[in-house]
Image (cartoon, coloured by chain):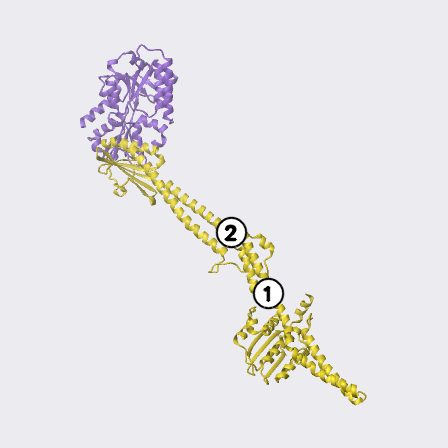
Amino acid sequence: MRPALSLRNGIPVTISVPIVVVLLMVFVSVGASQLVLSRLSSSQERQLRDLANAYLDGLEAVLVGPVLRQDSWEVFDTLDRARNAYAAIRPVETTVTDADGIVLASSEPRLAPIGTHLDPADSVDPAGSGVTLVEDRHEAILDRALAVEGRIVGRIHSRLDISPLLAERREVLWFLIASNATLTLILAALGWFTVRRMVAPMNVLLEHVGKAAAGAVEPIPASRINRQGREWARLFRQFNRMADAVSEREMLLTRVADEERLASLGKLASSVAHEINNPLGGILNAVDTIKVHGDDPKVRSSAIELVDRGLRGMRDVVRSILATYKEDRESRDLLPADLNDLLVLIRPEVRRKQIVLNWSNRLPPRTAVNAFGVRQVALNLLLNGCRATPNGGALSFLAKVTPSALEIEVSDAGPGLPSHVAEFLSNDEPSTSGVVSSGLGLWVTKRIVKELGGAVAAGKSPHGGARFHVVIPVVLEVEREVQRVA
Amino acid sequence: MQQHPDRRIALAYGAAAALSLVLPASAEEDPIRFALTPVFLTSDLDLLDHLKAYLEKAMERSVQLITRRTYQEITALLVSAQVDGAWLCGFPFIEHKAQLELVAVPIWRGKPLYQSYLITSRDRQAEEIGDLAGDIHAFSDPDSNSGYLVTAAYLAALKTTPDRFFRQTIFTYGHFNVVRAVASGLAQSGSVDGYVYEVLRETNPELVAATRVVRASDWFGFPPIASPVAASGSPRVSAIKAALLGMHMDPRGQEVLARLRLDRFDRESPELFASIEANRNLVRSIS
């Protein structure tokens, strides 16, 4: 799966940033809407107050006379005409009382008949500004004292219908909600799109770094680099330079592994030379014997027999070395002889150190694993065992095949493995640190086993030293077919 | 029915200007001054324009129409001879009959007579005046026969007065306003000119529909046109008389009469208003 850039909580940045945008927008728009609405209501109220006061001023000017005369008809006539003249402020009901609160006339005489006392519950805020908004009743209540020469002679009490104001407020509220929601959605989409674009190169980098960590260092293709901005393109090029360096190192390590085969030959050289030199001495003696006593058929045939045996021994050694170190090896199945050959290579060392070798080769005639790789691994482990085992110590070799894998076990009587080496062997991470900690031999062994798809485990040997257990899976027929076709 | 007042006024000024150009300069420079009580629809400026136009044409001289809020003001103008003639109510006519001369009386539905109506709101259960006791009652004018005297006389016959019988009385200074007061609920009942009420039935059917007639009175002499006794026989009064009596024979006059819902103007005897005088005396005897 492609790794996606995310914040600490695991939500991808492409989602979390738009969410933050939405939350921020909601926060801002709620605040802004609140501000707009409160400004709207205060401006509406101011406007209403102005209009209401104009209405009351107009009534007051006309009504003082009729109120003084207690002329109910004049008061009513004035209110009735004002209803049309001031239709814009939608007076619902206007009632005029005398100084004692007795109704002189109302624009709605049936609600407030002449001579009745005005319900004090309707007289709101007589000392205040004279305009009170009662929003749940959709009304504004006006109250104005009619004064002549500093004496109150009556009161104008009026109710205005403010439902259009409230409807306008509601309309504005809905408009704000709708526009803010739309804006929020657009910004969230924009945020998602932008962040997606922004993190796209980051994801490319993550993908490649992830692959590199898994061992497959791949440079970022040039087409992808060219699509990015300058900064990202620079970063990508830096990554590619790093990728190149890593690939180069990997190549060098492969070369080192190859060279190591020759290095182990070097280690064997003196003993191998000895192995060839010994029969060579016998052969030269036999040739001298033939020169001197060649006429004697008994002596001659025994000398030739000696030469023959010596040359065959030498041929075995040479063949075994060639088998191990031949370049351009073709892949082929493992035969029991492939492992037995190794005996020839380690025999000089075994003999020199008088090691008690316990050899057990239980391979079937043919095993479907890479013969050369297995030989190299087995040889490395045997040489490592020989080196570790003290003079006269024991060394065991066991090779067998289970239905799914080839198993090789080498146990020595050496001092055992330091724990960090054992850890390095069982650790799956590709690393070069093992070269230093375990020595080149074991490092190369692990590398080859891994190439063959197997694993090495280190433990304690019954001889008191180290024990290496290698498991290499057997290649199935189908896989082999595929490999061949490929 | 209703027209924009500004336009009507503009038309009136226009008409007046046109007439002043056409009319020959009169020996007597002063225009004829004619006063009107709010017996009919004073709010109808259009009607006043037509009346003025007709009178000016019929008399061939300029006319000034004078309206006041109360009957009393009109009566005072007439008695003091500040106007040449006035359309007033039968009640002030009999009150000042010594100083006034009857010029003409309108004929409505074939007779020089009209009634007073006691009205209340449409949905109210009231069959006679007794059911209206304790009401807030709307009168038209204290000097109106149909809008005050008829009801007061009826109560006087019951040995009571409007102030005692009703909880409160209000004067609206217009029959139209009585109907408005009753229709709106400001007053529970009212005394109104039957002629005006019948005209309103046609012109303001919705307003009238909110009310109903409890009782229609006997027939009384229709509000007459009078002039000061002092000016009796003067050319100005004669001109007014001729213009009124000939109104139904002139197309413009016919239009004015049609608006007023009247047949014509006729000569009548002051005796026509004797029943009003009897009512006046009855009311005085009680108070």
Tell me: residue B81, above or below residue A360.
above
Q: Mark 2 or mark 1: name the one nearer the start of the chain.
A: 2
Chain for disc number 2: A
Residue A194 image label: 2
Q: Chain B is drawn in which colour?
A: purple
Quadrant in the picture for residue A431: bottom right
Tell me: residue A389, above or below residue B115.
below
Give left or right: position of B206 versus A393. Answer: left
Which residue is nearer to you in this view: A396 or B98? A396
SS for callout 1: helix
Q: Write down the residue under mark 1.
A: A249
Tell me the residue at 62%/80% (across/down): A398
Q: Residue B23's x, y, as percent?
A: 36, 13
Give left or right: position of A296 versus A416. Answer: right
Q: Residue B115's x, y, as percent?
A: 29, 26
Q: Residue A414's x, y, as percent?
A: 56, 81
Q: Label the yellow chain with its letter.
A: A
Tell me: residue A265, above or below residue B132.
below
CA gap between label 2 and label 1 equals 39 Å
Chain for disc number 1: A
